[in-house]
C-alpha cells in the first residue's frame, strides 16, 4: 500500500520547481528515474523506494477534479496540472511526499489533496 498525495497546480512545474521540491525533502536520499524517466523515486541508502513522483498530467476536462477527488475539490479550476506523489507506508515517508507537494504548490500555485490518515498511513498534513 501507499499513501498518495496529489498536487493540483496552476501551471506546469518547471525543472527548477521539481529540483527545489526534491531539495525540500532533504539531501540524504538517493534519486533515480524509473519507467523510462516518467517516475522519479526518492530512495533510502539500501535503494528502497520511499516516494515515487509521477510526471505531471495536464487535466483539461471540466469537473474532473470533482469526479476524482470529491466535492471539496469542485472549485479546482481546469486546466490544472496533476502531480501524483506516492509514499511508502514506512515511518516518515508521507512527510517526504508532503514536503515535495508543498514546495511544488508554493512555487507553481494550487493546492494539495490527500486522503484522511488511517491505520495504514501516517498523518502527512492538512489540505493546503
Image (tube, rainbow, N blue to C red):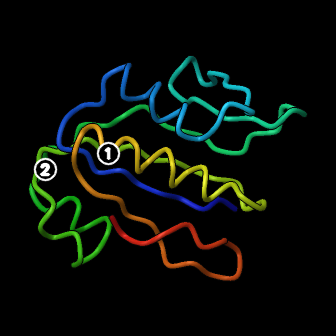
Task: Quarter of the image for the C terminus: give it.
Answer: bottom left
Q: Which residue is mark 2?
A: 61
Viewer-proximal residue among 27 and 122: 27
Q: Nearer the viewer, mark 1 or mark 2?
A: 1
Q: Relative to 125, does residue 59 appear above or below in the rendering?
A: above
SS label for mark 1: strand
What whole-number distance in Å separates the C-alpha atoms at marks 1 and 2? Answer: 12 Å
Extreme residue toward the right, this view: 46
Q: Relative to 26, does residue 76 appear above or below in the rendering?
A: below
SS label for mark 2: loop
Q: Quadrant of residue 81?
A: top left
Q: Which residue is mark 1?
A: 82
Q: Relative to 68, does residue 28 appear above or below in the rendering?
A: above
Q: Where is residue 39 drawn, in percent x and y?
A: 55, 30
Question: In percent of the image, x 40 and y 43: which residue is there?
Answer: 103
Q: For the residue carrying disc 1, how many other residues have a C-alpha within 10 Å: few (<14), some (14-19), or many (20+)? A: many
Q: Relative to 85, does residue 122 appear above or below in the rendering?
A: below
Question: In percent of the image, x 23 and y 61: which residue is there?
Answer: 65
Q: Quadrant of residue 31?
A: top right
Amino acid at each position: 500500500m501507499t499513501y498518495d498525495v496529489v498536487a493540483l497546480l496552476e501551471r506546469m512545474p518547471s525543472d527548477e520547481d521539481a529540483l527545489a521540491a526534491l531539495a525540500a525533502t532533504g539531501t540524504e536520499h538517493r534519486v533515480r528515474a524509473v519507467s523510462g524517466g516518467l517516475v522519479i523515486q526518492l530512495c533510502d541508502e539500501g535503494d528502497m523506494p520511499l516516494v515515487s513522483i509521477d510526471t505531471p498530467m495536464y487535466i483539461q476536462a471540466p469537473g474532473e477534479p470533482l469526479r476524482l477527488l470529491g466535492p471539496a475539490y469542485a472549485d479546482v479550476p481546469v486546466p490544472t496540472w496533476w502531480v501524483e506523489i506516492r509514499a511508502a507506508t514506512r515511518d516518515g515517508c508521507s512527510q517526504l511526499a508532503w514536503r515535495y507537494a508543498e514546495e511544488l504548490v508554493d512555487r507553481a500555485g494550487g493546492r494539495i489533496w490527500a486522503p484522511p490518515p488511517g491505520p495504514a498511513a501516517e498523518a502527512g498534513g492538512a489540505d493546503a
